[in-house]
Amino acid sequence: MAKPVILTVDDEPQVLNAVERDLRQHYRGKYRIVKAGSGVEALEAVQGLKRRNDPLALFLVDQRMPGMTGTEFLAEAMKLYPDTRKVLLTAYADTEAAIQSINSIGLDHYLRKPYEPQEVFDVLDDLLEVWRDTVDLPYDGIRVAGTLWSPASHAVKDFLARNRIPYQWLDIEANSEARELVEATEQGEHHLPVVFFPDGEVLVEPDNRTLAEKVGLQTEAKAAFYDLIIVGGGPAGLGAAVYGASEGLSTTMIEQHSTGGQAGTSSRIENYLGFPNGVTGADLASRAYAQAKRFGAEILTAVEATKVELDGTYKRVTCSGGDVLSCRALVISTGVTVKKLDVPGIADLAGRGIYYGASLTEAAYYKNQHVYVIGGANSAGQGAMFFSRYADKVTILVRGSSMGITMSKYLVDQIDGDDKIEVRTRVSVDEVSGKEKLETITIRDNDTGDVETVPAAALFIFIGAEPHTELVDGVVERN
């Protein structure tokens, strides 16, 4: 695969050469640096990159250039590369134009001249991290082969996706080449999924820890004693890891599945402090993870804390791999466990059309179909808005009389304005059914008692959660 490109544009040759030199020294071959002396020349370069299907990661563009300003160039270039990150270099007098371009062209950042190189790279490193996590590059990575309605295949895809590990999905029922690839393995198609790695290694029905080790996630602690241990890798745990490590404490965080927690599965969070345009849960988790690692925190993934004990002034944590870690301070941020829907048929169809939470890995497979969402709080609303991008229709089933009681007003307003979303209140699900996958759900009107059975492609369940505090039972008083 061709190296991703960083394109820098400035009409002053001395400045352009200096920026090019700094970019090459900082990224040292990770990106191909392309420079242009004008907006017109830069646009020609962009058109050439597009013809070759080269990935373009970032624009670093001066605003004040003759013939075509930086914002004018970006407005044209983003037609060809809409996902490329955009940074504008401005003089103080051009600040207003830069601020306006945030809304007009989705500018990611602007920097005033003169600037310190480290100031620039702090911004660029962050934006490039986001770009790598979100862009669809020409593929040469991990491939997961299985069947669409296999719970085990869903589990592997979900683990990789929530840990922001890119992969290509190969459905052996729809792709004959994928089936042949699987059949050529030692265990054939009788054990799915099969995960193929670029180095030639093949894993069959891997568990989360095996996957984590293979993709380079840390699964074993480097020491036996820490100043601070955090159990749970949601926003609270990640925040504790950042603050602890940044103060110089030896810090490790233990997460049994993926960093980000429940928030990490959200398709979009509009009311999180510091993100005026909203942020996806995956983006939030990725930024927090990178920040914690930057300060030196260890993050153990696919490792479960199975026991907590007090040892005088110290605390001991036993991990699923058998390691016993000790610490001065212990933070328990285990979050919640999603509530399960207890109706006939539900257990047999989990992962085969029935999903708990916003299963973002599966949403695209329901294009032009009718899906249902159960729940009346923010997570259900955020999920419904995301699913409406793909599904032909999304029906939200709410047990109460109104979503406004438990859902933020901004979400209620968005749902009201989406023609693809229908809301049904005072209803509940009595039963689900299907053979290989979900086929129908039975809905009860809670006022009249009337029931109806309707076809459904998928059912996404958001019916609340319960505190996940069993780990400290007998150690900390629980209410």
Image (spheres, rainbow, N blue to C red):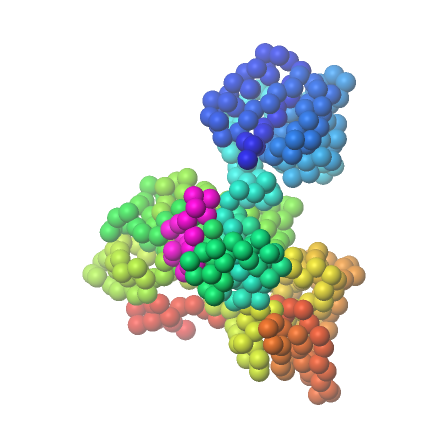
Task: Specify the farthest residue to the left.
Answer: 312
Q: Name above or below for residue 300 compared with residue 391.
A: above
Q: Position of residue 124 (x, y in %)?
A: 54, 32
Task: Specify the farthest residue to the bottom.
Answer: 449
Q: Position of residue 474 (x, y in %)?
A: 30, 72
Q: Quadrant of residue 314?
A: bottom left
Look at the image and say whether residue 180 sits in the magenta stretch: no
Along the line of sight, which residue is nearer the eye, 195 or 462?
Answer: 195
Can residue 421 be seen here? The reply is no
Along the line of sight, which residue is nearer the eye, 251 or 158?
Answer: 158
Q: Position of residue 241 (x, y in %)?
A: 40, 49
Can residue 119 be seen here? The reply is yes
Residue drawn at x 54%, y 76% is 348
Q: Position of residue 327 (x, y in %)?
A: 27, 54
Residue drawn at x 71%, y 81% is 453
In the picture, measured across the screen, residue 319 lies left or right of residue 364, that is left
In the picture, measured across the screen, residue 13 lies left or right of residue 295, that is right
In the picture, measured across the screen, residue 475 lies left or right of residue 468, that is left
| Extent of the magenta region | 197-214
Along the line of sight, which residue is nearer the eye, 205 or 447?
Answer: 205
**In which quadrant is the N terminus drawn?**
top right
Look at the image and say whether residue 210 sits in the magenta stretch: yes
Residue drawn at x 53%, y 60% is 146
**In which quadrant is the C terminus drawn?**
bottom left
Residue drawn at x 55%, y 50% is 168
| Total numbered circles | 0
Along the line of sight, which residue is nearer the eye, 79 or 479?
Answer: 79
